[in-house]
Image (cartoon, coloured by chain):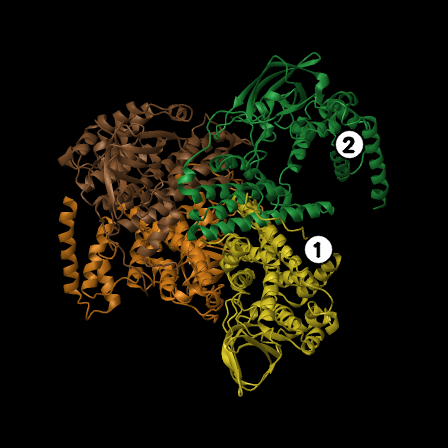
Chain colours: A brown, B green, C yellow, D orange
């Protein structure tokens, strides 16, 4: 029978380091990132710089994916995944994915060192100027370079609000270059977008003759794809964090809320839905871990693992958020109750880095199940 | 049929008389609606003298069509939906002669816009758990409590109110139903903002609100029965007919047609399934209307809302996935108080979020599935422990 | 906004004639077609000739779709749909769909009269020699004709066991002919197939120089497609019958079966599943009626109605049968209990006349929602 | 780790001694298995003298690997799964010294093949409702009743049996657990044919079957507790690891690869979803094994069977839809009694039908979801009315 070989087993558990990392980050977020504050980001522009500094510098988490030779922590994708789990759990409005993953991996893949040092120390924050919905196989730069500088428009870019470094993919006819722009700069117009998920603010960027430095040596396209692949490998961990918050919060509510003289969690239809949701969330966690571990080890199965996780985890997190809203009913429809933060984050995360069906399509090539 | 044959000319003549005596072009709308009420043409199924003629409800269409043709002021069914659709039938069913005489006409003239003070934070699906108290004080009742999910409270003159008059009785037995003046100084209305950013609804805080006993509808302790009548009138309005590609599916179909760049083969079968589901709901709704018109009690009615909500949620979620980058945006988070709700209006992000309410408001899908299982399919009810215990002794 | 117009409303109720027809057929089936007998068809070849004679001749139902000028009943697709509802409800092993629908419509569309008269009177039973899984847009004849007669092989043909007339689509290079073969005949080998659903027996037919008469005058392809479209419009009614039996039988069982001191139908998870199933089955009935009514009126919306019904009803009947098995649990896994008859019928019906995704694909053309 | 370091050489030495003293090439397999038992290598986690050495279970792998390498007779784990996997641990846990001495060894030598007489027509999910009666008669019990879904009963020498010894007690309290000789003349075994056409299982009719009190396991009235031990041992065996594309999905993937003529774009995204779901189950199972090996009690275990059943059912149904005409066929309806079940063996029609049992046998998915909700998630149990009433007075 014509079936595929089985890859070697990955380490799907959490190490002691990872568990400690999680605990310290969760303490910080419990303290510094309460839902009321996060919600206020829908009405006014949040100043997340203090929180980001605490995470990036005090806990040193901006340095996770940076090589030790550049001042990095010598950790890797597994630890970054744990960070994202916790940031998802708190719907935290900090640019970890955009700076510490996307920009960092792009820089380290092309062998850049100076900016990386500043990212590692927390002196700088960077953003990779691609639409948040860009998938690893879907890079199409919209910026061109000439003597006057960079010109073009890039929409829905995440993580620019605290960034002083912008990494811009530039089309040069037959290839892609990567340019660095130091912010603020003449010729760079940043327009905040109204986003479905305001806990990850988006910006539409217009460049008109912006000064830049080319920082790649011909390997920009591969580096940007690598950055997107890493982000795609780790976003499922954030989705797992979102789904876990929804599951735990709903469970707690179901045990406390009474209607018809019983806790509503004692109704069997609700119980079965929660049991099924728990199964989905459990699988989400396992697949997110598998994707992070294979990426960390540069395993041959990495791309399959990413496609599987992307196909499963985004939908699972949306399901968890939607069930959270429905089983809370009215209260979750209100602005005060934090459920909507997670619904919006889950839905936006489902679209971030490309929708699930794209990954299934890519997966079908990887596992030899062509569409026709 | 012979009924119809004699009724229709009679109705036509009555409308003609009304229009002759109250020229729509020159009569004040409020006055015209009063005349409409007095002529028994406001709701022909209501009793004579109370805005109606005691006719089957289907004849209203004829009246409405002729009024519309004459460009006459119509009843403000959207603006005062709770008054016209819920309070009025309840007053007809349970009001004293005096209440019917004084309360009905201002509803139809639009002098009294109503809101509904039923749901509470601790009484959602379990409406009979309302805790708002009504304490008798001479000829008055003193009402204290908090209500939620009150649409239109900030524009309402009057309210229908469900309150607990006797906490020593079991939960269903200790309720009494009132009409309440929203201009009482003890009534405080606060906007209740939703996840869409808007505040369609309100919270209403009642502090020593004084309601005269003459505004009690039904007997003391009969509140649950009266409220059930009100809610049955609410259900009728939901799930009415939609055209092909009406609602959410029409928005997505148009998006698919107009935006080839967003199409992807991996989304196509799912799109078609959603289209088929929407069409299945449309055809099922059409059959239900035929069954009702034919006098067959179509039990599918209870389920249409469940299906509608499910489809709206799935389709609006699909819409965002289809759009990719475009789905990451939202139109406006500003806190607003919309005059009316348009589920399919505004942008896809709003539609997605607002649709989440479809399976909650007006009876959660879970409660409706219970209703189908128990009342339509005859499956045994859940064991209940809260029915025979004094309300004040229930575990909280 | 670019949306479709709404077709005029159809009559989705049952007429008095239809209701009486249903009652007399149901009485007959209750009496003559008990599940024990139907099950025995899995172990031995059933003799369904008596039952078929009672339906076709005594109740006159073979004549429903035959024009009155050929001795027909002057009824139409709506009434045939009611017959199929009841046959589905009883999992009745009679060749109504194959003879009284497929063969009959093919014959009447080409204007044949003699065979139709014999079908109307019940003196003959006919079968259209195409695989049961053939969809209206998927006709590919596998038989050729020359001086020696017909030669070729046609697999999984339904309804041959009582047929004395075989209608064979024949490929003549650039078109299709329709030939009639009188059975039994030299050069015709009928091999009963082992079918998933033995309540609709299937036969593999090999023709090697079989004598035949060509009966079309150039319009064979359109006629066969018309026959397949009619069958596709009416099969949803059979699926509704199957689903209704499953729903009703499961409900009755849930009200009687006790576990944990309660009827199992009083458990809320079970209640919600049954309420959802009831919603599905109700929609199945409405769509089946819509397809039958539009076909009966030759409405412009017919093909859309057929595609919608085929997309929805087959899956719904399978769901009903699967839920019937699961909610009965052990007892429904046994050979004695009739649930499996309906599971097998529902699953085979899902494949009959083409799977649902084919109809969705066709529908996407009809409603201007192209796949790319 | 120091444990492991000292245990492994010791075990290796013991296996070597066994193999030296009982040359697998020349020793009768039954005799060899007896020697294996006597050497404490049959189940190293059992107590010394009872087939084991009191070691952690994971060391069994080492023994088995060496036995396999030496081509020695292995335990017949498939042929006598109930004896080895369920009866033996129960006997160790609840047996008297005498019972352990006499009953265990024949299980390991394969002289006693066991079946399980638990389920009854009226006691399926609600196993504690068993009605089969055990009436005390001197030193014996007289057993009457009917059991169903008994696999292997027609090949079994012995059975573990749950019966009602006191109908006046509440349902869980009146049960007693026995070992029963299947060769008793009162035992009648009838094949129970399934929807696949096969008869994997049996009905067992017990008519005045005499069971000596010496074969009672546990105290009188302690049957529920003993049976729970047995069933917990059953659960462990289910949902163990599968390779990528193991099970149903592998069959469908191979079909898709090998049959381009059946591919259709409308099926592709669904195929990929099913593939992803199967992989999700595989990875989750792998994580569960790592958690267990690491001493973390992985609560996901209870859910693996639910996921496995759902995936098997969806994939096998998809398989038929994919095949179109080919899916209309079946391989063989002949009534057969298979020696073992292979869910993914035979043709797609069989796989589809057989998979329906996956969510029923060994605990329905509904019961398992209850277990997850109550024991893992801590949601309140259903109100129960049957726990404190004498069994004979329960409504039927």
In the image, taking residue D177 as reference, residue C98 lies left or right, namely right
- Residue at 59 percent of width and 40 percent of height: B305
**Residue C137 in view, yes or no:** yes
Quick check: do tags 2 and 1 share a chain? no
Counting other residues with Cα less than 10 Å from the Cα at mark 1, is it few (<14), some (14-19), or many (20 or more)? some
Residue B244 versus residue B338 in the image, above or below: below
| Location of residue D307 in the rendering, given as x and y in whole percent from the top left corner | 40, 50
Query: Percent position (x, y) of residue A174?
Result: 26, 48
Q: Mark 2 lies on which chain?
A: B
Foreground of the two, C196 or B283:
B283
The residue labelled by disc 2 is B46
Residue D294 appearing in the image:
no
**Residue A171 image position (x, y, % from top left):** 28, 43
Element under disc 1: loop
Tell me the residue that label 1 is attached to. Answer: C14
Q: Nearer the viewer, residue B103 or C281?
A: B103
Q: Nearer the viewer, residue C218 or A173?
A: A173
Left or right: D97, with D314 as reference point:
left
Q: In front: D36, or A35?
A: A35
Taking the spot 55% from the left edge, 56% from the top edge, the residue there is: C366
- Helix, strand or loop at mark 2: loop
């Amino acid at each position: 029978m014509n079936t595929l070989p089985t890859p070697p087993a990955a380490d799907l558990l959490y190490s002691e380091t990872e568990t400690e990392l999680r605990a310290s980050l969760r303490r910080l977020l419990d303290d510094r990132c309460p839902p009321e504050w996060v919600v206020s980001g829908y009405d006014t522009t949040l100043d997340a710089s203090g929180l980001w500094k605490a995470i990036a510098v005090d806990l040193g988490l901006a340095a996770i994916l940076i090589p030790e030779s550049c001042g990095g922590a010598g950790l890797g994708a597994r630890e970054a995944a744990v960070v994202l789990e916790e940031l998802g759990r708190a719907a935290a409005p900090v640019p970890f994915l955009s700076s510490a993953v996307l920009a960092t991996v792009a820089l380290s893949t092309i062998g850049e060192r100076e900016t990386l040092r500043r990212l590692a120390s927390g002196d700088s924050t960077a953003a990779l100027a691609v639409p948040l919905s860009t998938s690893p196989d879907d890079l199409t730069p919209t910026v061109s370079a000439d003597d006057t500088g960079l010109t073009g428009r890039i929409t829905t870019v995440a993580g620019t609000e605290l960034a002083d470094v912008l990494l811009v993919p530039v089309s040069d006819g037959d290839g892609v270059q990567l340019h660095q722009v130091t912010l603020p700069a003449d010729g760079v117009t940043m327009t905040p977008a109204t986003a479905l998920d305001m806990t990850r603010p988006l910006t539409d960027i217009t460049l008109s003759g912006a000064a830049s430095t080319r920082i790649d040596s011909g390997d920009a396209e591969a580096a940007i794809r690598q950055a997107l692949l890493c982000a795609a490998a780790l976003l499922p961990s954030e989705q797992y964090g979102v789904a876990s918050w929804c599951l735990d919060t709903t469970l707690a509510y179901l045990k406390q809320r009474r209607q018809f003289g019983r806790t509503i969690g004692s109704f069997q239809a609700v119980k079965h839905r929660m049991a099924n949701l728990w199964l989905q969330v459990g699988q989400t966690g396992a697949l997110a871990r598998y994707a992070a571990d294979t990426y960390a080890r540069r395993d041959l199965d990495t791309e399959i693992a990413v496609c599987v996780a992307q196909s499963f985890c985004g939908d699972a997190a949306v399901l968890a958020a939607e069930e959270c809203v429905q089983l809370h009913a009215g209260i979750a429809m209100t602005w005060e109750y934090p459920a909507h933060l997670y619904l919006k984050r889950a839905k936006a995360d489902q679209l971030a880095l490309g929708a699930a069906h794209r990954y299934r399509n890519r997966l079908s090539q990887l596992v030899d199940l062509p569409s026709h | 049929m012979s009924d119809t044959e004699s009724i229709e000319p009679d109705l036509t003549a009555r409308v003609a008389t009304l229009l002759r005596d109250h020229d729509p072009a020159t009569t004040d709308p409020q006055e015209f609606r009063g005349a409409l009420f007095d002529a028994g043409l406001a709701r022909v199924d209501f009793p004579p003298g109370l805005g109606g003629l005691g006719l089957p409800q289907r004849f209203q269409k004829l009246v409405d069509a002729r009024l519309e043709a004459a460009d006459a002021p119509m009843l403000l069914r959207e603006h005062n939906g709770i008054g016209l659709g819920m309070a009025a039938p309840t007053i007809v069913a349970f009001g004293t002669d005096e209440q019917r005489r004084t309360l009905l006409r201002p509803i139809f003239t639009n002098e009294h816009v109503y809101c509904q003070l039923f749901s509470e934070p601790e009484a959602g699906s379990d409406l009979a758990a309302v805790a708002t108290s009504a304490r008798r004080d001479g000829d008055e009742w003193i009402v204290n409590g908090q209500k939620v999910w009150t649409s239109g409270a900030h524009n309402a003159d009057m309210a229908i109110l469900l309150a607990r008059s006797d906490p020593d009785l079991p939960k269903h037995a200790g309720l009494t139903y009132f009409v309440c003046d929203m201009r009482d100084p003890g009534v405080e209305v606060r906007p209740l903002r939703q996840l869409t950013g808007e505040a369609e609804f309100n919270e209403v805080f009642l502090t020593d609100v004084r309601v005269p006993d003459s505004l009690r509808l039904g007997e003391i302790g009969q509140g649950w029965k009266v409220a059930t009548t009100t809610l049955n009138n609410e259900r009728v309005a939901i799930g009415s007919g939609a055209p092909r590609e009406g609602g959410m599916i029409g928005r997505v179909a148009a998006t698919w047609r107009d935006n080839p760049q967003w199409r992807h083969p991996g989304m196509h079968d799912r799109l078609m399934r959603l289209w088929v589901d929407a069409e299945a709901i449309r055809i099922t709704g059409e059959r239900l209307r035929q069954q009702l018109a034919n006098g067959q009690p179509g039990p599918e009615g209870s389920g249409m809302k469940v299906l509608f909500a499910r489809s709206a949620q799935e389709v609006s979620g699909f819409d965002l996935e289809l759009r990719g980058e475009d789905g990451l945006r939202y139109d406006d988070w500003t806190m607003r108080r919309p005059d009316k709700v348009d589920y399919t209006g505004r942008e896809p992000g709003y539609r997605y979020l607002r649709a989440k309410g479809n399976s909650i408001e007006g009876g959660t899908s879970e409660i409706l599935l219970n209703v189908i299982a128990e009342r339509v399919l005859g499956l045994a009810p859940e064991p209940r422990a809260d029915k025979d215990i004094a309300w004040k002794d229930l575990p909280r």
